[in-house]
Image (cartoon, helix red, strand yellow):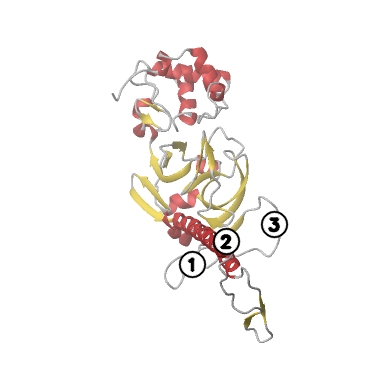
């Protein structure tokens, strides 16, 4: 079944909802309607070569006839025609391969959810066959522009895949990025699982990551409520969700022996929300950025002045730094540094 199109015009940002896709006779979920632009280009390119040097028309009975007799080789211009044929054929083949690659990425997208109740994996076709799709336009903070995504409500995905009543969710990405958030934020931020753009599953706009552009497949977890960008950063290339108890998942990063209202505790809260997705402490946390505590704590070889400037905006030191400028206030930066300095006396995991 193809995704239905609305006959009424909708304003930008208005979500469109589709029911779960129904299996075809072969038992597969049909892909949504898409403009056959790549096959059309390939066919047009090949047809263009066939028409080189020859015009055609359609007679009233519908048969195709030629207005010229078959061309005879004169030995002149053969190289030009052969070059055109080879060039167009290679271009057509490239377009077909690109189209096949997009379809293959969409077909191979698999989501795994791990929890105390076990592990379960579903393909994108499984999800589309069992959950309603909402098409929603929202500002992508990494691209700086609005994008229209095909999405499932994350709450529906977690319920379908029996994630249980986890305290926290950890989103695991292919590049080692780990975004964690309180399970309560699923509803508060209206988190959604995006699986494609502009009505096409598996179609993505590349996302800048430092000096390179990254394909965000297979999934992005997006927030339909972008009022608090500091609370949740969109994990792309996401393929696994883990429901955890934070204290049991990351016991070695907890600041022991400090009061709840101390600068160290407040710094830990900021670090947990903003830094743990990329960085680790005592080898627990993200894998994109460097480990910050062992064998040496970062405060042992970087000055407080440098760390303040770096945490404010890394691009002051490195052009196209992969680490983005933070939105932390000066007090929050000092509290993060206080937490890191405290952890220098609690090195574990070596």
Disc 3 secondary structure class:
loop
Q: Position of residue 293 (x, y in %)?
A: 37, 21
Q: Position of residue 92 (x, y in %)?
A: 53, 61
Q: Are marks 1 and 3 in contact (CB under 8 Å)?
A: no
Q: Residues within 10 Å of mark 1 (few under 14, many from 20)?
A: some
Left or right: where 333 falls relative to 245: right
Query: In this rendering, which labeled residue sits more in front, label 2 or label 3?
Result: 2
Q: Nearer the viewer, residue 143 or 61?
A: 61
Query: What's the mark number on residue 22?
Result: 1
Disc 2 secondary structure class:
helix
Q: Nearer the viewer, residue 110 or 18?
A: 110
What residue appears at the point 34 percent right and 18 percent down from the top-left corner? 346
Q: CA distance from mark 2 to mark 1?
A: 51 Å
What residue appears at the point 39 percent right and 42 percent down from the top-left corner? 243
Looking at the image, residue 238 lies above or below residue 87: above
Q: Position of residue 108 (x, y in %)?
A: 41, 55
Left or right: where 144 falls relative to 124: right
Which residue bears the numbered disc 2?
80
Looking at the image, residue 193 lies above or below residue 142: below
Left or right: where 55 falls relative to 289: right
Which residue bears the numbered disc 3?
10
Looking at the image, residue 9 lies above or below residue 250: below
Evaluate whether residue 259 shows in this view.
Answer: no
């Amino acid at each position: 079944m193809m995704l239905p199109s609305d006959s009424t015009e909708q304003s930008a940002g208005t979500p469109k909802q589709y029911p779960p896709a129904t299996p075809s006779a072969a038992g597969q979920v049909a892909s949504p309607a898409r403009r056959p632009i790549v096959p059309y280009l390939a066919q047009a390119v090949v047809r263009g070569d066939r028409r080189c040097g020859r015009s055609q028309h359609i007679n009233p009975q519908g048969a195709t006839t030629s207005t010229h007799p078959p061309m005879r080789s004169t030995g002149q211009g053969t190289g030009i025609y052969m070059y055109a044929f080879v060039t167009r054929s290679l271009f057509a083949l490239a377009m077909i391969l690109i189209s096949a690659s997009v379809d293959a990425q969409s077909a191979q997208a698999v989501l795994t959810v791990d929890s105390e109740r076990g592990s379960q994996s579903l393909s994108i076709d499984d999800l589309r066959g069992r959950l309603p799709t909402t098409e929603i336009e929202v500002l992508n903070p990494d691209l700086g522009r609005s994008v229209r995504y095909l999405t499932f409500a994350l709450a529906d995905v977690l319920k379908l895949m029996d994630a249980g009543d986890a305290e926290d969710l950890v989103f695991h990405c292919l590049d080692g990025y780990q975004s964690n958030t309180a399970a309560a934020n699923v509803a508060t931020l209206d988190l959604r699982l995006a699986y494609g753009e502009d009505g096409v599953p598996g179609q993505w706009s590349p996302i800048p990551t430092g000096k390179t552009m990254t394909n965000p497949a297979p999934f992005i977890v997006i927030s339909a409520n972008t009022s608090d960008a500091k609370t949740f950063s969109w994990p792309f290339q996401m393929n696994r969700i883990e429901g955890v108890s934070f204290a049991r998942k990351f016991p070695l990063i907890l600041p022991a022996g400090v009061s709840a209202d101390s600068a160290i505790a407040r710094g830990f809260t900021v670090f947990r929300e903003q830094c743990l997705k990329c960085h680790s402490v005592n080898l627990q946390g993200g894998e994109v950025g460097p480990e910050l505590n062992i064998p040496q704590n970062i405060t042992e070889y970087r000055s407080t002045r440098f760390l303040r400037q770096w945490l404010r905006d890394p691009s002051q030191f490195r052009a196209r730094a992969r680490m983005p400028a933070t939105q932390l206030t000066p007090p929050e930066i000092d509290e993060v540094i206080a937490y890191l300095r405290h952890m220098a006396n609690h090195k574990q995991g070596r």
